[in-house]
Image (tube, rainbow, N blue to C red):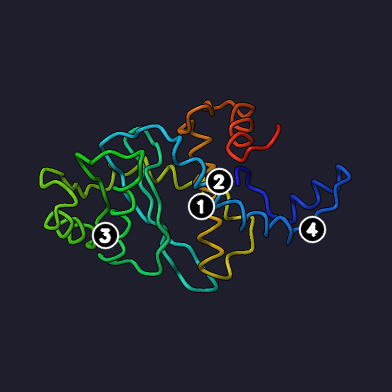
Amino acid sequence: MRYSLSYRDLEEMMLERGLHVDHTTIYRWVQRYAPELDRLCRPHLKRTADSWRVDERYIKIKGVWTYLYRAVDASGNTLDFWLSETRDSDAAKRFFRKALTATHTVTPRVINVDKNAAYPKALKELKAEGVVPKSCELRQVKYLNNRIEQDHRFLKRLTKPGMGFFSFGTAERTFQGYEAMNMIRKGQVRGGGKGDILAQVALIATLFGVAV
């Protein structure tokens, strides 16, 4: 979940160390434990800021384009993510609702987005429903989203070595692991210092209740 390696790369690296693990076994580990990593680290996430950067990137699943909605704050800390089969105001609303109900996020003061017409409509409806305060400002200025564009690069590096995704569920579970590991890597989880890989390994072991 952290490094730009395919499952076959990991199979060969383990074999070099005398461990015989098939790449399909590693795939099954990811499908089983990536969502668990996301679930376990959530209660330990540090609070984020009230300035949001929201964007979506294209993900191809079995030859069909889907959309990964993502948001970071002004410091680049991950707010939340949402994999969707559609790119419209309903999808944007579902993503905003998920991000707003996360335990580590605060009510946004300003939301920076691109020129996607779905965002103004989604935010207007959420304000009408009382989910988002009317004082929340939506800014559609592309250069203000440089922070999240840079954050996308981490995921691009991880997805490139693989052979793609063959089902929506597989992609969804894998991205849960990618995003959770990205938050740990950035030092967003209490007890896992930014840039301290040993502390992060110890943190993950603690979350899963295993010995380092």
> Residue 6 location in percent, x, y?
68, 54
Which of the labelled discs sits on residue 93, or is there none?
3
Q: In which quarter of the image is the C terminus?
A: top right
State yes or no: discs 4 and 1 in contact (Cβ < 8 Å): no
The residues tagged by marks 2 and 3 sit, at their Cα atoms, a distance apart of 25 Å
> Residue 118 location in percent, x, y?
24, 62
The residues tagged by marks 4 and 1 sit, at their Cα atoms, a distance apart of 22 Å
The residues tagged by marks 4 and 2 sit, at their Cα atoms, a distance apart of 22 Å
Is 69 situated above or below 137? below
Residue at point 62% right, 56% down? 32
Kind of residue at badge 4:
Asp
State yes or no: discs 2 and 3 in contact (Cβ < 8 Å): no
> Residue 34 location in percent, x, y?
58, 51
Kind of residue at badge 1:
Gln
| Residue bearing the label numbered 2 | 37
* Mark earlier in primary sequence (1, 2): 2
Secondary structure found at label 3: helix
State yes or no: discs 1 and 2 in contact (Cβ < 8 Å): yes
| Residue bearing the label numbered 1 | 176
**Image quadrant of residue 74?**
top left
* Mark earlier in primary sequence (4, 1): 4
